[in-house]
Image (tube, rainbow, N blue to C red):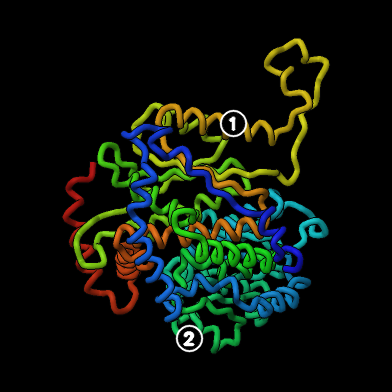
Amino acid sequence: MGAARDERWRTEMRLTVNVRNVFTDVVGADHGVTRQQINGLLPRFETIRDDIETRRKRGELPFLDLPKQDVRPILDYVRSERDRFDTFVVVGIGGSALGNIACHTALRHPYHNFLPANRRGGMRVEVPDNVDPDRLSGLFDTLDLRRTLFDVITKSGSTAETTSTFLVIKERLQTAVGAKWRDHVVVTTDPKSGDLRKYATHEKIAAFDIPPGVGGRFSVLTPVGLLSCAASGIDIEELLAGAGDMEHRVRTTPIEKNPAYVSAAIHYLLYNHPKSPKRLAVMMPYSHALKDVADWFRQLWAESLGKEKSLDGRTVNVGPTPIKALGATDQHSQVQLYIEGPNDKLFTFLEVGRFQKDVTFPDDPDLRHLNAFNYFGGKTMGQLLHAEQKATTLALTRRKRPNITITLPDVRPYTVGQLFMLLEIQTVVTGGLFEINPFDQPGVEAGKVATYALMDRPGYEEEKKKIEAEMAAGEQFVL
C-alpha cells in the first residue's frame, strides 16, 4: 500500500470509538455502566484474549489473518476479464452478498452503475440477494448477457437460493452465448468439497477459494467480497491494509483502552443491566456510504450472538437484537421512538469526519428575508449532516439513552477495512462474554433443512412428511 503503511497514515486515518455516553455519570446509574464494571471483566478478557490467540495459532480463526493473504490471483483475474465484461453479478445470499453490498455502497460512487464506462473505473456490480422471481427477472431485463460475468458464491456449494438461481443463469447464458457460457461464470466456494466445486472442476470454470474456517458473515475480506470489489475498481490492497492495522491495534492495545474489548464489555453489561437491560442494538450511520455496513453488521451480530445453548450446554437463549437506521433519514421515522419510547436500546453511531464531495449552500438574495432559508448560506451539507448527528446524540444522551460513536476520518478502503475488522473482533469477544459459540448457526441450518425437504431434495423425504403433517394441523386456524 506504499505510503499508506507508514505511521503518519495510521495516525491520520485512525478510526476512533467514543464511549463517553454510556457511563453512569452521563446517563445515570439506571441506564449506564461504570468503569469499575468494565475493569471487573478484565480477568475474563484475559482468558478470552488467550483463547483467541491459542485458537489462532491452531488455525481455527483464519479471519484474523485475512489481511496477509496474497490477492494477486484476484487482481490478475480481474485484469484478464475487465475488457470483456462491463457488469459483474454477485449470485449469493446472506454472508455471500451483504459484504459485497456494503463495500460497493461505501467505496464506489453512489450512482456507480449509472455512470458511463469511462467514468466508473470498473465494472457495474449487481447483487440480487434473494430468490424473488420479480427481482431476478427485472435484473435480466437490464443485462447484456454477452457482457456480463456472474460470480456464484456459496461456501457449502449447496445453498438452495444460490444453486437454484445458477440454474436460471446457466440456461439464460446458454441461450445468449452458447458453448461460451462457462467464460461468463466464476465460482467462489470451498476449495475442495461441495457440489459447486465438483461441477466447476468438471466444467473447467474459473474458481476462487473461501478459506476453510471462515464463515459467511466473516467472509467479506475473502474472495467472497474482494472479487467484486476488484472488479468495480476498489483498492482491495488498501482495504486489507486497514483491516490488518486494526487487527494489530486490537491485539497489542491494553484491554482497558482496547476499542474491541471495551465496546464488547459495554454491550454485554448493558444487555445484562439489572435495572434496565438494553437488549436492542441500533446501528445508525450518518453517511449514506455506510448505510449498508449496518445491514452487514446486522447479520454478523444476529447470527453470531443469537444462541440457545451456552458452551457448557445450558439453555440461555441470548442475543442482542440488531436494528439498522440511517441518519438523517430515520430521524423522521424512528428517533421519536428512540427518544420517548422504551429505554431498552444501545445506540452505535457511525460518523464520517470528511465527505468525499461536500455541497455548499448558496446565499440566495431572493430568500434572505425568510428565516427558513437565510441561515444556510455559505455552510455545507456536510455541516448540516454533522449537526443532525450531534443533535440526535445530544437528545438521546439527555434522555439517558446510552450511545457510542465510531468515527471514520473519511470513507475509503483503509477506514472501511478497519471498521470491518473492529466489528468482527468485537463480535467474537462479546460471544466470549456470553459464553456461546459465535461461529456456528444451528438455527439457520434448521431452516435450510426444511427448505431442502419442501423442495424435494433427495434424502429429505422423511423431513418433508413431518413438515406436511405440521402444516396440515395448522390449516384449521387459517382465517
Residue at image x 44%, y 43%?
A: 282
- 348 w.r.t. 174: above or below: above
Indicate left or right for 47 with 133 as reference: left
Q: CA distance from mark 2 to mark 1?
A: 50 Å
The N terminus - image quarter: bottom right
Which is more N-terminal, label 1 or label 2?
A: 2
Indicate left or right for 87 with 158 as reference: right
- 149 w.r.t. 348: above or below: below
- Residue 60 placement (x, y as % from top left): 42, 77
Indicate left or right for 358 with 457 as reference: right
Q: Nearer the viewer, residue 391 or 225?
A: 391
Q: Nearer the viewer, mark 2 or mark 1?
A: 1
Residue 336 visible from this viewpoint: yes
Question: Disc 2 designates what residue?
Answer: 192
Please tell me whether mark 1 sits on a helix, a strand or a loop: helix
Residue at image x 46%, y 62%?
A: 425
Residue at image x 63%, y 80%?
A: 182
The circle drawn on residue 278 is none
Q: Quadrant of residue 391?
A: top right
Q: Nearer the viewer, residue 401 or 375?
A: 401
Residue 92 visible from this viewpoint: no
Q: Quadrant of residue 412?
A: bottom right
Please tell me whether mark 2 sits on a helix, a strand or a loop: loop
- Residue 236 placement (x, y as % from top left): 67, 67
Q: Nearer the viewer, residue 354 or 376?
A: 354
Kind of residue at badge 1:
Glu
- 347 w.r.t. 238: above or below: above
Mark 1 neighbour density, 10 Å: few (under 14) some (14–19) many (20 or more): some
- Residue 43 placement (x, y as % from top left): 33, 61
Residue at image x 26%, y 67%?
A: 311
The circle drawn on residue 388 is 1
